[in-house]
Structure formats: C-alpha cells, structure tokens
Amino acid sequence: SPRIFSGIQPTGIIHLGNYLGAISQWKKRQDENENVILEIADLHSITLPQNPETLRQSILQMLATLLACGISPEKVLLFQQSMVSTHAELSWILGCVCTMPRLAHLPTFKEKSASLKDVPLGLYIYPILQAADILSYKATHVPVGEDQSQHIQLTQELAKMFNKRYGYCFPIPHAIVTDNVYARLKSLRDPAKKMSKSDPDPKSRISLLDKPEEVIIKIKKAVTDFTSEISYDPEHRPGVSNLLSIHSFMSSKSIDVICKEVQGLNTVSYKKLLADVIVAHLQPIQKEYYAFLSDEEYLHNILKHGAEEALAISTKTLDEVKEKLGLKYSA
Ligand code: TYM
C-alpha cells in the first residue's frame, strides 16, 4: 500500500506556494486516510548558517503552522528530522553510492551556492540527505512542489543503484506534483519566477501569517499586465492567472466560475475582491496558529512521540541496509 513521505524546512514563514503546492496536498491525503509521514527538515535548514535561538523557535512555529493548516498528529506521523539520527547515518551510506558530478548540476545547489564565496559541503550533499529521509521509510510517493522534482529523481536513482548493487531493499519513490499551477505558484512581483521564501522582496509572496493590510497591499501591487479584464491564460497572462489560481483554491470555486463571476470587473477592483477572499481564508488559520504556538508543552509532546515512532521505522530500514552492506550480521 502507498506510503507517503514529505518534508518542509522550518526556516522562513510559510507562503502560499508552500501552502497550495505542498501542505494542502498533504492534508488531502491525510483526510483520505492514507499513510502519511511528514518531517520538519531542520538539518536541511542548517546547510546555511542559522541563529540558534531563531532556529529553535522556527521549529515550533513550523509545527504550529502545520497543525493550524489541519495536519493532525493523530492521523499523520509528524516529526523533527534531527531528533531521528538514522537519517544522517543512511545519508552517509547513500553518499557512498552517489557520484560527485551527479550533485553539481542540481538547480537548488546552483541557485544557492551562486551568491556564496565559501560553499558549505552540506549544501552540496543536501539532496542525499533528502533521499535518506524518503528511503528511511521506504516511501512510495512524495508529494512536493515542482522545484523538488529533481531531488526525487535523484532519490529514485540512488534507490535503484543501491538495489542493484546490494539486493532489493527500497521501493522506487514517485514524486506527486499536482498537474495544476499550484505546483509552481508564481512570485507576485515577477510571474516568471516562483514564489519563494528566499526572495528578498517580501511583496513577492503572501505569508500565511500576513495581516489583512499586508495582504491587501501585496495583492494591489501584484504585477499583472495591460489588459484590464480578467481571463485565465497562464502562458500569455501569467500574473492574472496566478491570482486566479490562488482565488480558486481559497474559494473552492473553479476558475471558470470565478471568471464568469468577475466579468466586467477591471484588475483594480478584482484585486480588492481577491484580497478579501484571501484574508477570510487566512484568518481562521492564523487564529489556530497562535493558539497552538502558546501551548509549548503540547508541541514538544508531539515531537517526542513523533520521533519515537519515526526512529522505530527508520531503524528497521537502516538495519536491513547495514546487513546488505556487510556491516551487520543479521537484520
Ligand atoms: P521547502 O521547505 O523549500 O518547501 C516545502 C514544500 O513547498 C513547495 N513549494 C512550492 N510549491 C508550489 N509553488 C511554490 N512557489 C513553492 N515553493 C515551495 C516545495 O516544492 C516543497 O514541497 N528539501 C525540501 C524539504 C525536504 C523534503 C524531504 C521534501 C527535506 N526532506 C523529503 C520531500 C521529501 C525543501 O527544502 O522544501
């Protein structure tokens, strides 16, 4: 039966790209009672320097965010990556299977190392740790946004190479990327780019915790085009189409229905209407978020239980791997 695994870095406030592209997909599978495992990928966050106190807070904030978005620790195995030591160990082993040139061309590395004088090794081997995350649970499906698909492809290759060299151990995991625009939500300032946590301009994204006035300003300033009417055409009108996608998600209406409803509105009045829809959608999530965040004991408890369960599953895999490699006598 399918085993679903995914993860998110705790650093940076979640934006609508993460929410539509990833978290809501996870929630959907959770609600369909699938076997879902979710990780707060804090070891991935330290591939770039982090302030320890801020990182500590970010982890709990991410947990509170996931809960506020409807992820339930009763239905999903939810844990913090660094609390489960097996991932780093499997990552070493996979690093011995992977070649160096295979990592050099991955877009995340190229993008993030471009601006650095001294590139940390961790940034380079980051995708191997991600493969170890996925393979530790013998996951079959990995719901992610489009920017992660090359990492999943690497994971597939490593799984195949390992299986071939040492005997079958890992099912080949498949990326699940939604076939709509949610998989790659665009920057509000430049619809040619994806919405991203690392964009220096906060107006490029709407964060889950943005206040109503921030949402209104950001949508008002969102770059569209010179056509005043509202129509959906991702290729020729990426800006407006991006807004319509957000609208469709937030209102649970189809894009066709929305286009008919807003016929006759110009971009300025359409943006006002959309900002209201977003604010209404985010308000209950924000309320929940602050409630969860104030209960640190509850949050720590979730992480403690999650880590125990994750460690049990991943240790079984690691033992099997070690046995196949000749590092251990019997699984
Ligand atoms: P991260 O934290 O950068 O992003 C979390 C998820 O959000 C998706 N996403 C988007 N989706 C649509 N439109 C966008 N503009 C957008 N921006 C981000 C990402 O694709 C991702 O699904 N390396 C991973 C975390 C990770 C992981 C894993 C994921 C660690 N181990 C194992 C899957 C499996 C990352 O940095 O995601």
Image (tube, helix red, strand yellow):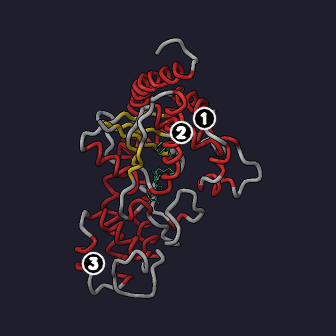
Which residue, given by chain and number where applicable, does mark 3 sit on? 259
Q: Is residue 56 above or below residue 219?
A: above
Q: Residue at coordinates 56% horizontally, 38% vertically from top-left?
A: 129
Q: Position of residue 40 (x, y in %)?
A: 47, 39
Specify whether 177 is left or right of 44: left
Tell me residue 264's x, y (percent): 28, 87
Tell me the distance, in whole angstroms, between the alpha carbons under discs 2 and 1.
Answer: 7 Å
Rendered image quadrant of residue 276: bottom left
Q: Mark 3 and mark 2: span between their CA atoms?
A: 45 Å
Q: Amino acid at mark 2?
A: Leu
Q: Regarding mark 2 in the picture, which secondary structure is present there? A: helix
Q: Residue at x 50, y 64 (%)?
A: 194
Asked if residue 51 can be seen in this view, the reply is no
Residue type highlighted by circle 1? Val
Q: Quadrant of the N terminus?
A: top left
Residue 153 sits above or below residue 78 on the image: below
Q: Nearer the viewer, residue 301 or 256?
A: 256
Badge 2 or badge 1: first in the primary sequence: 1
Please give the residue where the numbered disc 2 appears in the rendered image.
158
Instruction: Write down the quadrant of residue 46 in the picture.
Output: top right
Instruction: Determine which of the numbered discs, if any, sits on residue 97 in the image.
Output: 1
Q: CA distance from mark 3 to mark 1?
A: 51 Å
Viewer-closest of 254 and 51? 254
Q: Which mark is residue 231?
A: none
Residue 111 image offset from top left, x and y in percent: 63, 57
At label 2, counting other C-alpha atoms closer than 10 Å, the crowd grade (few under 14, some 14-19, many 20 or more) is many
